[in-house]
Amino acid sequence: MSPAPRRRSGGDIKTKVLDELRFLRNWIGNPLTTGAVAPSGPLLARSMAGYINPEVPGTVVELGPGTGVVTEAILERGISASRLVSIEYNPDFCALLRDRFPGVHFLQGDAYAIRTNLTGIAELPLTAIVSSLPLFTRPLAERQRLINTALDMLAPGAPFIQFSYALVPPVPHGAGDFTIERSNWILMNLPPARVWIYRRPAKA
Ligand SMILES: C[S@@+](CC[C@H](N)C(=O)[O-])C[C@H]1O[C@@H](n2cnc3c(N)ncnc32)[C@H](O)[C@@H]1O
């Protein structure tokens, strides 16, 4: 039997507590950008990563990795580190992530400038985008622009995967050419969250 993969974030209690403290400290310093007081739970992270099809080749992009709970779930889903590019605004988180996940390309920058940030780094179309950005802290027009730019960069039908704690989708129906799917509530996450999947249908 092959050994279980070594968990790189939150796997042992000391790492988990240190990550929670780091998160809380960053939230106190910048609540709107950090977007949560603690990292997401592994069930939510695995649920997000579950919408990626690892059989489809190409680059997977993560937005807002934080301390890496979702990054880890993406790697465990079968996406190799060399296929993953991750954009994080916070330099403290970036330093931790580079140490924790060798081989993943972490860009320190603004995910809302996704096209500029990925120029020359990721070949299009992308295979999937997994976002933990606190979208509701931005005006609707900015969220809409982000989703539509991201969908333009993805292959038709490929997922833009976003979690939120809200009852309504972070970008509503009708704000672009996309479908929206949503998961059930993940009640084991604190606070309970769900996953929204945006896709641009292939042209007939
Ligand atoms: C709610 S936390 C999620 C962190 C982690 N993915 C998790 O689920 O535990 C949001 C993350 O997005 C990052 N972030 C917020 N705005 C950003 C932006 N404009 N560009 C890149 N990262 C951003 C924050 O620094 C933070 O790490």
Image: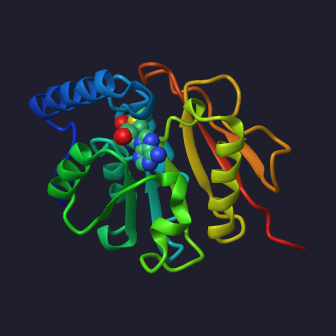
**Camera-nearest residue between 162 and 24:** 24
The residue at the point 86 percent across, 44 percent down is 174
- On screen, residue 145 above or below 15: below
**Camera-nearest residue between 30 and 95:** 30
The residue at the point 65 percent across, 35 percent down is 139
**Camera-nearest residue between 12 and 172:** 172
Q: Quadrant of ligand 1?
A: top left
Q: From the viewer's perspective, is 164 left or right of 107? A: right
Tell how many labels.
0
Residue 104, image quadrant: bottom left
Residue 31, image quadrant: top left
Q: Residue furthest right?
A: 204
Q: Is residue 12 visible?
A: yes
Q: Is residue 46 visible?
A: no
Image position, residue 13 (x, y; %): 13, 28
- On screen, residue 145 above or below 40: below
> Which quadrant is the C terminus positioned in?
bottom right
